[in-house]
Image: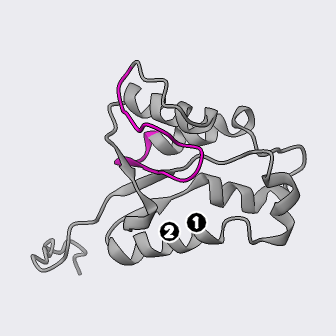
């Protein structure tokens, strides 16, 4: 009995969507006091749910949200760029695109190699890393999702 079988190609099957790194500015001083109550990011959860509904073939990765959920279980980790930078950079490199949600803390969205980005240290670091790896960036107004 042979295990060699012809490969079946299903032309009706969709091409997988993109992996999208979702970046957003945050006010770090608010997070430590509000992580425990679990409501700090409800508006972000709702927006990520809308993105998932509107783009069902895409996979959205939001390290700000996913990472902060883990903080209370990780010794010595704080909600700051210095501790999460490598993790975020690895995810950016594995993503097809970066989408920046323009929440409070963002002004004058521009995307250029020499831009100051006018945002948090984390978003700025993620955008610089995306530019370095030539990963497309889009700026998304959450009210339009």
Q: Residue at x 38, y 29 (%)?
A: 131
Q: Residue 80: horizontal and vertical position, in percent? A: 74, 39
Q: Residue 113: horizontal and vertical position, in percent? A: 37, 21
Q: Residue at x 86, y 66 (%)?
A: 36
Region rendered in magenta? 93-113
> What residue is pinned by disc 2?
48
Residue 12 visible at all: yes
Q: Is residue 73 magenta?
A: no
Could you say which is closer to the camera, residue 6 or residue 99?
99
The quadrant where residue 140 appears = bottom left
> What kind of colouring is applied to the model shown?
one colour
Quadrant (top left, top right, bottom left, bottom right) of the N terminus: bottom left
> What residue is pinned by disc 1?
44
Left or right? Give the position of 106 relative to 96: right
- Labels 2 & 1 near each other (Cβ < 8 A): yes
Q: Main secondary structure of the magenta part?
A: loop
Disc 1 on helix, strand or loop?
helix
Residue 56 visible at all: no
Q: For label 1, count other residues whose C-alpha is less than 10 Å away and answer few (under 14), some (14-19) or many (20+).
A: some
Left or right? Give the position of 21 relative to 34: left
Left or right? Give the position of 129 relative to 87: left
Q: Residue at x 83, y 45 (%)?
A: 77
User: Compared to 98, does 134 lie above or below?
Assistant: above
Could you say which is closer to the camera, residue 108 or residue 17?
108
The numbered disc on residue 79 is none
Disc 2 on helix, strand or loop?
helix
Left or right? Give the position of 68 relative to 143: right
Mark 2 to mark 1 CA distance (whole Å): 6 Å
Q: Residue 54: horizontal and vertical position, in percent? A: 34, 74
Q: Residue 143: horizontal and vertical position, in percent? A: 43, 66
């Amino acid at each position: 009995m042979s295990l060699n079988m012809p490969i079946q190609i299903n032309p009706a099957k969709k091409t997988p969507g993109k992996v999208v790194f979702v970046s957003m500015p945050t006010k770090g001083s608010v997070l430590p006091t509000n992580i425990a109550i679990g409501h700090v990011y409800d508006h972000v959860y709702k927006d990520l749910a809308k993105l998932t509904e509107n783009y069902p073939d895409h996979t959205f990765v939001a390290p700000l949200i996913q990472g902060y959920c883990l903080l209370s279980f990780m010794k010595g980790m704080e909600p700051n760029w210095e501790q999460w930078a490598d993790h975020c950079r690895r995810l950016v490199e594995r993503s097809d695109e970066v989408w920046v949600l323009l929440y409070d803390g963002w002004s004058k969205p521009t995307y250029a190699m020499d831009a100051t980005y006018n945002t948090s240290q984390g978003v700025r670091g993620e955008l610089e890393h995306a530019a370095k790896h030539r990963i497309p960036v889009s700026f998304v107004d959450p009210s339009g999702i």
